[in-house]
Image (tube, rainbow, N blue to C red):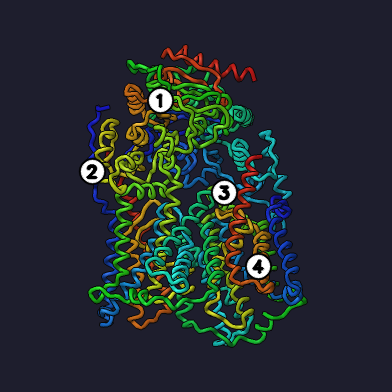
């Protein structure tokens, strides 16, 4: 089965190698790198990034671009914070509500795209702006600082180097893999991304799959927002503000095709890990943190270049 | 070959269909001005008009920067990055190296063009989409800028810089607006009357067919990115003059939305091959008007983004509706 | 299963696409559907496959009238199609593509072994040596078509429609496809084979229906009762006649374009020929022979790896079309009018003037609209282009007028050499004749033409000499005596002798 073969595929092996080499180099550069605490810090910051990347990845899988990932995340974050601080929701309820809001936001994106027939790029550009507007309009840029101690504790707790926070993205990644590679709706989603006309002829509704992808994307962005709030200990309106470029960079580096129908969960995961390594490594090795952005751009180029080179080689066979 | 009477009219038909989009935009902007000036007497004050004009000019040029790349069928996610690089470069030249303002500005604009050239070169050389390349370069350029400047704002610039920003012509017109208008006219002439402009539009509409017709498509794409970089730099320098300092917070992702908003609302196609210079101007005008109006109505800046998003949605929906109606019209009899 | 087309008519805003079309498709037969482009074939296909509804008349499936609201209705009724564009998901396996509509599941999860088990029989039915687990994106075009046929079988297709299935496959693959089709026919499937290639139709079809100008010209004729000449006359309404194009003079002392033992990155080997001033040099071959690719290689869209390319006696390396036009005065009328020959969204004016903007520009690279108009109008008149204004979008012109615009831009450029690739595919007869006369005319003015065509009659009408290309090599050169029988025979012999030698 294609999925099985892809698990053993060489495509993300390069990334895995990069991660290992990077970790090795960093551990040499600084004794602080391989400490349990540092790995914990790194994995904690990667937790949010993973979900952000997957939120974009699933849209890419159906052949769409979602510019509203960060904006929706920010909106969910402040609403989540508001529910906790102002309305004193129990945490579990607030989380559920947050995810529901995320799904709603995603549905808005999906339905607008499908019903109007307008390019998803423009639609999500508009909704991103709208979500941000609602976010800042309501909060006046003031964060919610009084988060329940249980939530903040969850954001801090860990077993050894493994932060509790990481459990969510790992579980969701596994579910996503199951969904996209072994379940009918997920396969339909990827079929639409791969060849929407062929999918339509086989009774799959491209519009329906686009809406589904956006809904899942919204849910993932919402979970990312919740995790971000837990991690920060406060619900900041600025959450999500820097997610946009990241959300594209990780899937691209991880081998997800921009055109649709071709996603790599493992690849995206490793890409996030490499990026987290860079971010963390810069701090630990006392390198100028401004190098992170620069390296991110370089990574995207390298990944794309590698993919091209590999494609050219395959064609020559 | 001459058996059929040829019924072609050699006269250029005035394309009312395309112009009506811009016309309706103009009407909306004027209507909003009327509403806002009624709501608040301060709206039409000379200061407000001046500030509006200044702000509009910057948004217009940012929009132009994106528009010229949209024209050739690509997009430039590095508009903000190039802008901030030009800002900090210019600021460094003026403050740290003491170069005279005109030279510093000229060199900063050159940098913008060079960074744009890098983008274009990478795109045509690698064949990778402009989305990915400029996504990467946005990070590369911003990152490099941060590394080199350590994110330190430069506010000891020569006083002429800030003075230029405060200059008023006839009490209400900012020279920025004049610059934006001149650029607009130049771009209009470019696309309507020049060879290069037609090459741009042909390359954007169908790069394959354009190449097969002898259009130097790759050269056109690179040139459009150079132009985009230059315009981004100009916009950045305008902000420097307005603020009186070179700040690393300028540009960046903040410019992403406005760069698309103006052109798309104004009728420039995301897919390429069609531009409207006047429409981009009006689109930016709509944005600026709403921003100022919200302020004036006391709704506050925080809700601005929501309105902008709705405006963008509304504009594309209207355009869609009209396109569908045009297509439904009966095929013209031959 | 039988399908009867009963007095079907379809009209679009300004065109009567189908007019009282009736014929019968029977199970266990391969029924060829032929006609020039514009004859109504593609409209008919769209009606049969459920994309359009007829304005008049009806379809009868085994005697029962049917009404399809969508392509899925047609599929459900047992009508499947293999179109010219691929309808497969590239990253999915062959098996998953075949069972795309109803993948088997176990406990809610996709059951991969079951996919293999269920999909393989359909491949076996076609005796196809394709791995059911292979990713479709890695297959060749011919293999993908077989997968699509297997998919149609899995949907219990009893009437299979194939639209120009051998358009982008090699002869070898086409032959393999025919074996598959015969096997299907013997199982009772009704096969509708749409093609414009006479040789293939004679090779595979049991019956032929010919459409001409939206009407039936030949109804379900048994192939045995037809000669080539009769079939062609059904398609074009007159005997295959070679037009006389009048006196022309070739200046043999001047060689405009020459290839000496050229190898290309496309696979051409040892290609040599010389094009003289005022000559029409034909390059004939079947699909897949490598003719367009040779043109592309000459124009810089591929690498010339061996031998020499000379323009007016001087060895050159042409980098791209821009250089070919500006520096070497070579033009290329592409065979793909819609994607390469024209910018459909732009106006007639733009499409014609694109090659001469540089020339008519004044100071600062600015173009006066009047100059553009003045440059374009003479060509409109000369080619009799019918459009309502110069600013009309080319997309809205008829096929013939579109082709005229596509050619006009090269005439505007006044190139010395013009490579013309399949100039009259999908063009109505009248325009075809006009274009032939035009090609002859421009050579009288000194332009040298390399004519690529798979239309034998066109080639014999126009060319002075005919190069025969097969398998990316020149297998022969024939002097054209403008006699259809002798020259066509000479050409086909060259092609077949290569086949037989292999």
**Label annotation for residue C370:** 2
Do the residues bearing badges 1 and 3 touch, measured as CB atoms within 8 Å?
no
**Residue B190: percent from the left, percent from the top?**
32, 53
**Do marks 3 and 2 share a chain?**
no
What SS does tag 4 mark? helix
> In whole angstroms, how far apart are the C-alphas of marks 4 and 2?
60 Å
Q: Which residue is mark 3?
A: A202
**Label annotation for residue A278:** 4
**Residue A182: percent from the left, percent from the top?**
68, 57
Pair 3/2: label in front: 2
What SS does tag 1 mark? strand
> In whole angstroms, how far apart are the C-alphas of marks 1 and 3?
47 Å
Q: Quadrant of residue A52?
A: bottom right
Do the residues bearing badges 4 and 2 touch, measured as CB atoms within 8 Å?
no
Q: Is residue C38 above or below residue C114?
A: above
**Label annotation for residue C187:** none
Look at the image and tell me whether residue A218 can be seen. yes
Q: Earlier along the polypeptide chain: callout 1 or callout 2?
A: 2
> In whole angstroms, how far apart are the C-alphas of marks 3 and 4?
44 Å
Do the residues bearing badges 3 and 2 touch, measured as CB atoms within 8 Å?
no
> In whole angstroms, how far apart are the C-alphas of marks 1 and 2?
31 Å
Mark 2, other Cα within 10 Å: few <14 / some 14–19 / many ≥20: few
Mark 1, other Cα within 10 Å: few <14 / some 14–19 / many ≥20: many
Q: Nearer the viewer, residue C416 or A143?
A: C416
**Do marks 1 and 3 share a chain?**
no
**Label annotation for residue C449:** 1
Do the residues bearing badges 3 and 4 touch, measured as CB atoms within 8 Å?
no
**Do marks 3 and 4 share a chain?**
yes
């Amino acid at each position: 089965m294609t999925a099985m073969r892809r698990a053993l595929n060489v495509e993300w092996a390069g990334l895995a190698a990069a991660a290992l080499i990077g970790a090795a180099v960093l551990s040499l550069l600084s004794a602080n790198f391989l400490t349990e605490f540092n790995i914990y810090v790194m994995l904690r910051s990667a937790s949010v990034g993973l979900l952000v990347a997957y939120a974009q990845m699933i849209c890419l899988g159906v052949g769409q671009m979602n510019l509203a990932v960060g904006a929706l995340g920010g909106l969910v974050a402040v609403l989540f914070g508001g529910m906790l601080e102002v309305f004193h929701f129990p945490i579990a309820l607030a989380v559920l509500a947050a995810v529901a809001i995320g799904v709603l936001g995603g549905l808005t994106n999906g339905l607008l795209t499908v019903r109007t027939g307008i390019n998803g790029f423009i639609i999500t550009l508009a909704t991103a702006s709208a979500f941000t507007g609602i976010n800042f309009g309501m909060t006046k840029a003031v964060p919610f600082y009084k988060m329940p101690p249980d939530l903040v504790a969850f954001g801090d707790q860990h077993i050894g180097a493994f932060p509790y926070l990481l459990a969510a993205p790992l579980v969701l990644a596994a579910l996503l893999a199951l969904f996209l590679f072994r379940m009918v709706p997920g396969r339909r989603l990827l079929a639409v991304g791969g060849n929407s006309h062929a999918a339509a002829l086989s009774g799959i509704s491209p519009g329906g799959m686009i809406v589904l992808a956006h809904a899942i994307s919204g849910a993932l962005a919402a979970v990312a927002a919740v995790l971000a709030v837990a991690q920060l200990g406060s619900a900041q309106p600025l959450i999500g503000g820097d997610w946009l470029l990241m959300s594209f960079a990780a899937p691209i580096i991880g081998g997800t095709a921009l055109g649709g129908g071709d996603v790599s969960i493992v690849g995206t995961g490793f890409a996030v890990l490499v990026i987290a390594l860079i971010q963390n490594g810069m701090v630990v090795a006392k390198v100028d943190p401004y190098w992170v952005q620069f390296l991110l751009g370089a990574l995207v180029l390298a990944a794309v270049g590698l993919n091209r080179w590999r494609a050219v080689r395959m064609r020559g066979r | 070959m001459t058996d059929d009477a040829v019924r072609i009219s050699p006269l250029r038909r005035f394309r009312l269909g395309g112009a009506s989009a811009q016309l309706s935009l103009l009407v909306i902007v004027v209507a909003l001005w009327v509403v806002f000036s009624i709501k608040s007497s301060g709206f039409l004050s000379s200061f407000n008009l001046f500030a509006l004009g200044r702000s509009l000019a910057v948004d217009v040029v940012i929009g132009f920067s994106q528009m010229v790349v949209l024209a050739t069928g690509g997009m430039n996610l590095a508009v903000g990055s190039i802008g901030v690089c030009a800002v900090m470069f210019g600021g460094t030249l003026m403050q740290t190296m003491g170069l005279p303002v005109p030279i510093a500005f000229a060199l900063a604009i050159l940098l913008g063009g060079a960074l744009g050239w890098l983008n274009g070169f990478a795109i045509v050389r690698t064949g990778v989409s402009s989305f990915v390349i400029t996504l990467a370069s946005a990070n590369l350029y911003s990152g490099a800028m941060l590394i080199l400047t350590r994110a330190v704002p430069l506010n000891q610039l020569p006083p002429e810089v800030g003075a230029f920003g405060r200059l008023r012509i006839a009490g209400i017109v900012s020279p920025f607006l004049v610059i934006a208008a001149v650029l607009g006219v130049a771009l209009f002439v470019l696309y309507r009357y020049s060879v290069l402009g037609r090459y741009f539009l042909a390359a954007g509409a169908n790069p394959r067919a354009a190449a097969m017709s002898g259009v130097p498509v790759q050269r056109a794409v690179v040139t459009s990115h150079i132009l985009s970089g230059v315009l981004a730099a100009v916009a950045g320098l305008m902000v420097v003059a307005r603020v009186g300092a070179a700040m690393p917070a300028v540009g960046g992702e903040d410019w992403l939305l406005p760069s698309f908003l103006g052109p798309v609302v104004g009728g420039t196609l995301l897919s390429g091959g069609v531009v409207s210079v006047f429409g981009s101007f009006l689109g930016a005008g709509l944005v600026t008007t709403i921003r100022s109006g919200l302020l004036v109505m006391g709704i506050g800046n925080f809700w601005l983004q929501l309105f902008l998003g709705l405006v963008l949605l509304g504009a594309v929906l209207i355009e869609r509706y009209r396109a569908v109606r045009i297509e439904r019209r009966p095929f013209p009899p031959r | 299963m039988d399908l009867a087309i009963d007095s079907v008519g379809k009209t679009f805003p300004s065109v009567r696409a189908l007019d009282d079309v009736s014929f019968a498709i029977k199970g266990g037969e391969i029924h060829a559907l032929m006609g020039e482009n514009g004859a109504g074939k593609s409209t008919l296909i769209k009606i049969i496959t459920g994309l359009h509804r007829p304005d008049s008349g009806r379809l009868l499936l085994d005697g029962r009238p049917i009404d399809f609201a969508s392509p899925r209705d047609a599929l459900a009724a047992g009508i499947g199609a293999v179109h010219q564009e691929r309808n497969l998901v590239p990253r999915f396996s062959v098996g998953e593509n075949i069972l795309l509509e109803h993948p088997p599941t176990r406990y809610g999860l996709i059951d991969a072994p079951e996919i293999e088990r269920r999909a393989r029989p359909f491949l076996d039915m076609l005796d196809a040596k394709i791995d059911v687990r292979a990713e479709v994106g890695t297959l060749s075009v011919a293999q993908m078509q077989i997968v699509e046929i297997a998919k149609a079988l899995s949907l219990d297709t009893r009437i299979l429609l194939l639209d120009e299935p051998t358009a982008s496959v090699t002869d070898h693959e086409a032959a393999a496809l025919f074996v598959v089709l015969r096997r299907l026919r013997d199982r009772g499937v009704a096969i509708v084979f749409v093609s414009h290639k006479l040789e293939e139709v004679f090779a595979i079809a049991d019956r032929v229906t010919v459409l001409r100008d939206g009407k039936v010209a030949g109804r379900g004729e048994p192939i045995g009762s037809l000669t080539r000449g009769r079939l062609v006359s059904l398609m074009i309404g007159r005997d295959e006649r070679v037009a006389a194009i009048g006196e022309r003079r070739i200046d043999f002392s001047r060689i405009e374009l020459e290839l000496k033992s050229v190898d290309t990155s496309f696979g051409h080997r040892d290609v040599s020929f010389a094009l003289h001033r005022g000559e029409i040099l034909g390059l004939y071959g079947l699909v897949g022979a490598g003719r367009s690719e040779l043109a592309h290689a000459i124009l810089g869209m591929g690498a010339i790896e061996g031998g020499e390319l000379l323009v007016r006696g001087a060895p050159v390396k042409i980098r791209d079309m821009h250089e070919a036009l500006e520096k070497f005065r070579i033009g290329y009328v592409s065979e793909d009018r819609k994607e390469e020959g024209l910018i459909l969204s732009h106006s007639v004016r733009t499409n014609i003037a694109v090659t001469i903007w540089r020339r008519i520009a004044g100071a600062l690279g600015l173009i006066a609209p009047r100059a553009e108009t003045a440059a374009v109008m003479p060509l409109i008149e000369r080619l009799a282009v019918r459009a309502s204004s110069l600013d009309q979008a080319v997309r809205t012109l008829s096929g013939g007028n579109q082709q005229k615009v596509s050619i006009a831009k090269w005439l505007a450029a006044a190139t010395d050499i013009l490579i013309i690739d399949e100039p009259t595919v999908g063009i109505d007869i009248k325009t075809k004749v006009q274009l032939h006369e035009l090609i002859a005319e421009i050579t009288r003015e000194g332009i040298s033409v390399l004519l690529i065509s798979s239309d034998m009659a066109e080639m014999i009408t126009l060319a002075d000499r005919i190069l025969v290309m097969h398998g990316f090599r020149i297998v022969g050169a024939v002097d054209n005596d403008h006699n259809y029988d002798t020259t066509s025979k000479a050409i086909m012999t060259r092609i077949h002798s290569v086949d037989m030698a292999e």
